Image (cartoon, grey):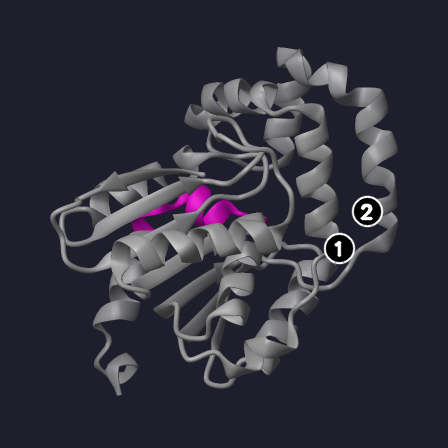
Amino acid sequence: MIFTEYGKDRKDTIILLHGGGLSQWNYRDQAKQLSSAYHVVVPVLDGHAGSDAHFTSIEDNASEIIAWIDENCGGQVLLIGGLSLGGQVLLDMLAQRADICRYALVESAAVIADKLTGALVGPAFGSSYGLISSRQFARLQFRSLHIRDELFEEYYRDTCAIGKQDMIAFMKASTAYVLKDSIRSVQAKVHIVIGERENRIIRQSAEKIHTAIAGSTLQIMPALYHGEFSLNHPDAYVQMVNAIVNDPKEKE
């Protein structure tokens, strides 16, 4: 796994985990802003553009990042944030290690298995993978994701760089992921964020996470689609992170 670091001389560490099919640019603006006060680490999840390994499982990605924290951060960091697939990796990290971070910001993570979509991933990509290199097709996909226009070139470049088997693997893993029972023992203060215009599975997943983790908060962002909060509103994301870690009530 590849780790890019900002503000390496800062004391407290924040780790940000990008969404499936994306890469480090998902959190680049946030990392630059937060690096004035924090050591910010943005990994490239396995199987994605710029990674050094094929995707195996969400659990393996979680274990890899935990091992990196053990080696470089003394076993715990200040905050971990994750979007979608990255949010699932974050939840699995919390399930594997209850005290891996003091605060967690989970955005738009599915924890209810979608068997129908999972069954269709292989056949769908088997027949349409060749279209990924088409700029016209990529532009249509990009618009459907509601990502701000200035990120298109990086989206297109990195989507083209993902191998077919890796894309199928992480998409199937994401549709099959369910919340581990051990998440109930988490010691981090967990904040859950979704967009108002998310699909049913994401909305129900957010409620399930909120119910399972005592003391967690759930915030629904008005008028936003899946992933729009971190992708399109980096300033607001940074404000939320700062509010979480600097709130006196959070330190109780």
Q: Which mark is residue 176?
A: 1
Relative to 54, is 111 above or below? Answer: below
Which residue is nearer to you in this view: 236 or 130?
A: 130
Write the residue at 48% across / 78% down: 186
Write the residue at 26% across / 58% down: 73
Tell me where residue 170 sits by quadrant.
Answer: top right
- Disc 2 target residue: 118
Give residue 104's position: percent from left, percent from top: 41, 66
The quarter of the rendered structure image containing the N terminus is top left
Residue range highlighted in magenta: 226-236
The quarter of the rendered structure image containing the C terminus is bottom left
Tell me where residue 8 sits by quadrant.
Answer: top left
The numbered mark, 1 or 2, whose residue comes first in the sequence reads: 2
Which three-letter amino acid code belongs to the residue tagged 1?
Ala
Whether residue 144 appears in magenta in the rendering, the answer is: no
Disc 1 packing (10 Å; few <14; some 14–19; many ≥20): some
Relative to 232, is 71 above or below? Answer: below
Give residue 195's position: percent from left, percent from top: 55, 57
Which three-letter amino acid code belongs to the residue tagged 2?
Gly
Give residue 47's position: percent from left, percent from top: 58, 34
User: Would residue 19 appear left or right of 99 to someone viewing this image?
Assistant: right
Query: Which structural element holds mark 1?
Result: helix
User: Would residue 13 appear left or right of 22 to someone viewing this image?
Assistant: left
Contact between labelled residues 2 and 1, with CB atoms less than 8 Å apart: yes
User: Would residue 112 appear left or right of 103 to someone viewing this image?
Assistant: right
Query: Which structural element holds mark 2?
Result: helix
